[in-house]
Image: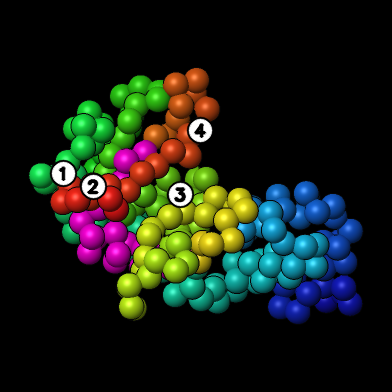
């Protein structure tokens, strides 16, 4: 191992990382699944990329940490098999959305409003957008997570990253539906999503 390679990270040189521009480091961080990079300084980015690379190489990633966990892996459709949850407060948006229950279902057209409770569908949608499961700090209820969100890597300092297990536990406990789009009408990727409860107006 050459002297400038990071410990336990064969092939990844911190010297090389430090030679990269901040924008390039942020892009590298996104490739490694690191969220919240927009507020990081260069040295923080170098450390974050090194750590993410180590975890990816040796499989020692903390599966209970942010974005970790077994929930949402292929085959996990959730307790309702991906089917929508309805009730007195079911919105018109949900009624007019196309129901997606598994990774095998495709949108009928670009810009179509979609809805699901399938863990595997939600996790894949988020990971395709480098989004990390999160909760809004200060909205927790005792030991329970507060408002559920995704961190797309923007300046969202009030978001706290959580594991997929925690995120989906809360999602199911509140009987939420996931309304979203895969693409906008112009064919570009869409980050639109909304969480909605059939039993009350707010989620």
Q: Which residue is mark 2?
A: 201
Query: Dots 2 and 1: beta carbons under 8 Å?
Result: yes
Q: Secondary structure at mark 4?
A: loop
Give how far across and how far down residue 34 sits, in percent.
61, 60
Q: How is the image coloured?
A: rainbow
- Compare marks 3 and 1 and give the one earlier in the sequence: 1
Q: Is residue 68 visible?
A: no
Q: Secondary structure at mark 3?
A: helix
Mark 2 is surrounded, within 10 Å at the Cα level, by few (under 14), some (14 to 19) or many (20 or more) other residues, namely few
Give how far apart the Cα atoms at labels 4 and 1 are: 29 Å
Give how far apart the Cα atoms at labels 2 and 1 are: 6 Å
Task: Give the magenta-colored segment's residue range.
Answer: 161-180
Q: Is residue 195 left or right of residue 48?
A: left
Label of residue 189 in the image: 4
Give how far apart the Cα atoms at labels 3 and 2 are: 24 Å
Q: Secondary structure at mark 1?
A: loop
Q: Is residue 116 visible?
A: yes
- Compare marks 4 and 1 and give the one earlier in the sequence: 1
Give how far across and how far down residue 1 sits, in percent.
83, 76
Q: Is residue 13 above or below residue 99?
A: below
Label of residue 89 in the image: 1
Name the residue nearer the viewer: 191 or 165.
191
Q: Which residue is mark 3?
A: 126
Q: Quadrant of residue 71?
A: bottom left
Query: Dots 3 and 1: beta carbons under 8 Å?
Result: no
Name the residue nearer the viewer: 32 or 39.
39
Q: Is residue 99 above or below residue 119?
A: above
Q: Secondary structure at mark 2?
A: loop
Query: Dots 4 and 2: beta carbons under 8 Å?
Result: no
Q: Is residue 88 left or right of residue 63?
A: left
Give how far apart the Cα atoms at labels 4 and 2 are: 28 Å
């Amino acid at each position: 191992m050459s002297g400038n390679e990071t410990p336990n990270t064969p092939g990844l040189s911190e010297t090389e990382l430090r030679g990269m521009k901040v924008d390039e480091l942020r892009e590298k961080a996104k490739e490694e699944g690191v969220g919240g990079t927009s507020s990081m300084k260069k040295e923080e980015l170098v450390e974050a990329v090194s750590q993410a690379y180590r975890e990816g190489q040796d499989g020692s990633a903390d599966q209970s940490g942010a974005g970790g966990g077994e929930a949402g892996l292929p085959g996990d459709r959730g307790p309702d098999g991906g089917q929508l949850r309805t009730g007195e407060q079911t919105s018109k948006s949900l009624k007019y959305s196309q129901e997606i229950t598994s990774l095998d279902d495709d949108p009928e057209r670009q810009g179509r409003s979609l809805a699901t409770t399938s863990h595997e569908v939600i996790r894949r949608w988020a990971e395709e957008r480098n989004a990390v499961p999160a909760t809004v700090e200060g909205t927790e209820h005792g030991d329970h997570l507060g408002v559920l969100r995704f961190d797309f890597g923007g300046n969202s300092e009030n978001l706290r990253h959580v594991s997929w297990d925690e995120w989906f536990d809360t999602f199911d406990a509140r009987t939420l539906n996931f309304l979203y789009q895969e693409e906008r009408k112009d064919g570009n990727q869409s980050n639109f999503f909304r969480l909605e409860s059939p039993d009350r107006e707010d989620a």
